[in-house]
Structure formats: C-alpha cells, structure tokens
Amino acid sequence: MSLRVFQSRSFNLLRGDGSSAVKGENKTSKRFLSWQHAKSNSSSHLKLVALASTSSVSGSGAEYSEGLLDVRKKEKKKKVAGIDQDELVDPALLADPDSRFCEFKGVHVHHKVYDVASQGRDSTETASHARLPHIPMILLHGFGASVFSWNRVMKHLAGLTGSRILAFDRPAFGLTSRVKSVEFSSRSKDEKPLNPYSMAFSVLATLYFIDFLASDRAILVGHSAGCLVAVNTYLEAPDRVAALILVAPAILAPYFSRRGDKGSDLGRENKTEERSSGLDAAVNPFSRIFRFLSQTINAISEVLVQMVKGMGGMLSTLYKKLLSTFLRSAFAVMLVRMVIDKFGIAAIRNAWHDPNKINEHVLHGYTKPLRSKYWDRALLEYTTAMLLDADSESKPPLAERLHEISCPVLIVTGDNDRLVPSWNAERLSQAIPGSCLEVIKQCGHLPHEEKVEEFVSAVEKFLQRAFGGSQEQQILQAVS
C-alpha cells in the first residue's frame, strides 16, 4: 500500500467515519498510531489519535464523541489559592484531633475547647497569681479566618482565667457545615427561617455556647469582623457578657459632633416667622394669595415625596432581589473563586507586619477550609446576608449604640494594621465609655498571632484591672 493511500485512509479514520475500513487494515493503522504516539509530544493529540483508533475499529462516530466528552470531564479544575478543587470533601473529614462538632439549628458547628482542668493542672493555682474569677472566654474569629486563628493563644488565655476557652467557626468559615440557601429556606413553613449566615444566627450561636460552657456569662474576645458579633451579642443580652476584648475591631467608629440647642432655636425662629407671616396676611391681600399658593405647592410636594418614597421602596426591593440573584449565580461562584485565588494569599501576608514570619503551617491553616464542599457558595451566602440584612434596617446603626456598652472593654490594635487602621481603634475607644486601648508596636492586623506575648500581657493587665480587685471595686468599676 502506498504512503499516499495510507495517509488518505488514516485521515478518514481520524475523522471518525471508519466506514471504508476493510479487513487487514486495522493492524496497519495500529502500527501507524503507535508511530504517531512516539512522534507526538502533545497530550491532546495523543487523546485524539487514541480515540480515532477506537472509532476506526468500531466504525462508530458516536463512540468518538462520547470518548471526547469523557476526556473533558476528567480535566482537573483550576486550583484556588494552591488548593486543588477537583475533589472537595465534607468539612468534618478535615477535622483536627481536638476538633469537636455540635448541631445548632441544623448547622454542624465546628469548635475547640481548651480546658485547664483537662490538661492536668490545678485551675485555682493557675489563676491565683492574677486573682481572677473563673469566667470562661469565647473567641470569635474574623472574616476569612477560623478557629485556627486562635491556636497560639488559647492555652495562655486559659492559664489567665483558670477556666475554659472556646472558639467556634461561624457558618461560611472554617470547618462548620455549609448550608445551602434552599435547605434553610424550606425547613420551616410556619415561621420565618433563620439564615445561618446572618448576624442574628452568630449572636444566638454565641449565647448558645455560653450555655454550653455551663456559665451565666462569658468574656467575649472578637477579632476584626468577629468584634461585630461580640458587640451585637452584648447589645442583645448584656447580662450574659462579663467583658469585651476587641482585637483589630472592624467596627466603623463614629465622628464626634456634639449637638447643641441649635435645633430648638431654629424651631423658635420658625414659629416666630409663622406668627409674623400671619400678621402680614391679615393686612396684605397679596400675602394671602402667596400663602395659599405656597400651601398648595407644599401639599403637592408632599404627595410627590410620598410617591418617590414608594418608588424608592420598590426600587430597593428590586435592587435586593437582583443583587441576591446575582450573588447566587454561577458567574458569582466563578468570580469569588477568582478573587480568592488572586488575593487570598496576598491578604494573609498583608495582615502581618512582617510577612516573612508566615510559614507553610500558617498558610495551610488558612487555606484548608478551601477543601470543603460548597465553600464558595457559602461565602456568597454570607456576603448576601451581610449586604441584605433585614434585621439591621429595623435597628439603629451600631455606631450610634456604642455608648450603651457598660461592661469592661479592652481594644487591642497593631500600629501597622494595613486592613483596619489603628486610628479607627483609637476613635472607637473614645466612643465606648471607660474602654481601654492597647497599641502593640510593630504589629499588623493579627496581634494574637504575630505578637502572642504582647497580646497575652495586654489581656492579663486588663483582666486584673477589671476583675482583680475586691468585689466592691468590681461593682464600682462596672457602674462607672
């Protein structure tokens, strides 16, 4: 058989028609395919030739198409922040030896507990040097973090209080189970379902863990966005919170502007103007006409304003629906993967004052949750819940309620925090009555990870001031 004829038939085989194949040509074509296998350096070309050989033997183009689809399905997904997304698993399978899980309102919450007593130490002796009451602590991580963020300080904090220290992963983070929006929306038909990604859920979960520790109250330690959960928990149940420790708090501090009596002065001026305008109307007929026209215009304006408000409500509802639909779309999932892949590791490094201190253990701790099933959709659900939080609309802004905090408060910040500037922490300390501010030098956004000794020392001094004195002093301090 000439080379030209062989190439022609080989071309027909590669096209997948195979109908001209005759007995005895399969062996020749196999030898030719083996020669092609040795010659080609392209993996895609090898797949194509192998599939062509299969179709030439069977004489079916449909099998070629099915084989090509199988090859495409087997192609691995792109990695996100170095984590292979091809085989995601249930978060519980990623648990550490000291991990614990409990079910709260249908969500399997991952948490860890450090108990001084279980470590073979005398809790009374451990806390005697600080003269501190045995009040448990609950640690609340920030956005994108998890229980891992507290690993370096849990043991030290337990030594200070002589009590148990608990840290848990909020939904969408760490190893807590990811709940789909369809699942929690269809659980209860009689009452409004509680969104596990909402602030209300995090507050209730925090109160649940105070009961879990068999305590009447606890010291809440929040980091970054976790400070929002800590403060909201206090405002929801102030009698359950013994103290607040806010680390690099992602709470927008208010600007201070003392209100005088200018408003009442303006009111008196308006009333005076109304009286004078009434006198003018009795004397001047043109004033009556002007007054009538102004009242008519005001009435029409009020109607228009109400119409605009109604339209604004409709537009707001439409905006929320469109935003919710977008954040739950396949495009949004792809977008969040791109963002985490592009900026995830960079954000971790940027959170430290000295990025050179970040080792593989730290990177692994922060990226391990990316191996969980539905981590991307859960992150979008969390974002949706934060942006469209209906409960926050019915309450005053948090910045306007900071003056209601009366428990002891410590605010810790790093002088080189590039994510939440230290000046915001300073303003926040001025907004919360009686709060203490501790600025740690050469420290970034994670004082409890980057400067463990300095952080623990600041907490110890604060606890001694707040709880180290006599009971009468504690009462006076709480009242003041």
Image: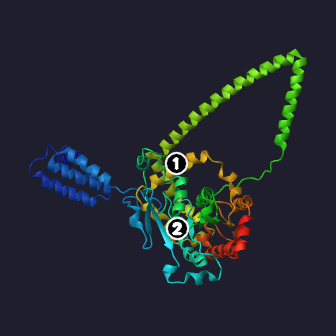
Kind of residue at disc 1: Thr
Please give left or right for residue 385 compared with residue 292 in the image.
Answer: left
Residue 464, picture quadrant: bottom right
For this orientation, the residue located farthest to the left is 23
Q: Secondary structure at mark 1?
A: helix
Colour convention: rainbow
Q: Position of residue 443 (x, y in %)?
A: 65, 69
Query: Dot 1, how many residues are within 10 Å of its Cα: few (below 14), some (14-19), or many (20+)?
Result: many
**Which residue has dot 2 on it?**
167
Residue at position x 86%, y 16% from top?
A: 286
Q: Earlier in the sequence, mark 1 or mark 2?
A: 2
Residue at point 22%, 46% (across, down): 11
Observer-nearest of 452 and 50: 452
Q: From the image, which quarter does the C terminus lie in?
A: bottom right
The number of discs equals: 2
Please, what is the three-letter code of the amino acid marked with disc 2? Answer: Ala
Can residue 276 be spotted in the picture?
yes
Question: Relative to residue 469, is residue 49 depicted above or below?
Answer: above
The numbered disc on residue 384 is 1
Front position among marks 1 and 2: 2
Where is residue 217 drawn, in percent x and y? 59, 66
In the figure, is residue 192 to the left or right of 463? Answer: left
Q: How far, Cα to Cα, is label 1 from label 2?
A: 24 Å
Q: Position of residue 244 (x, y in %)?
A: 64, 65
Percent position (x, y) of residue 273? Answer: 87, 30
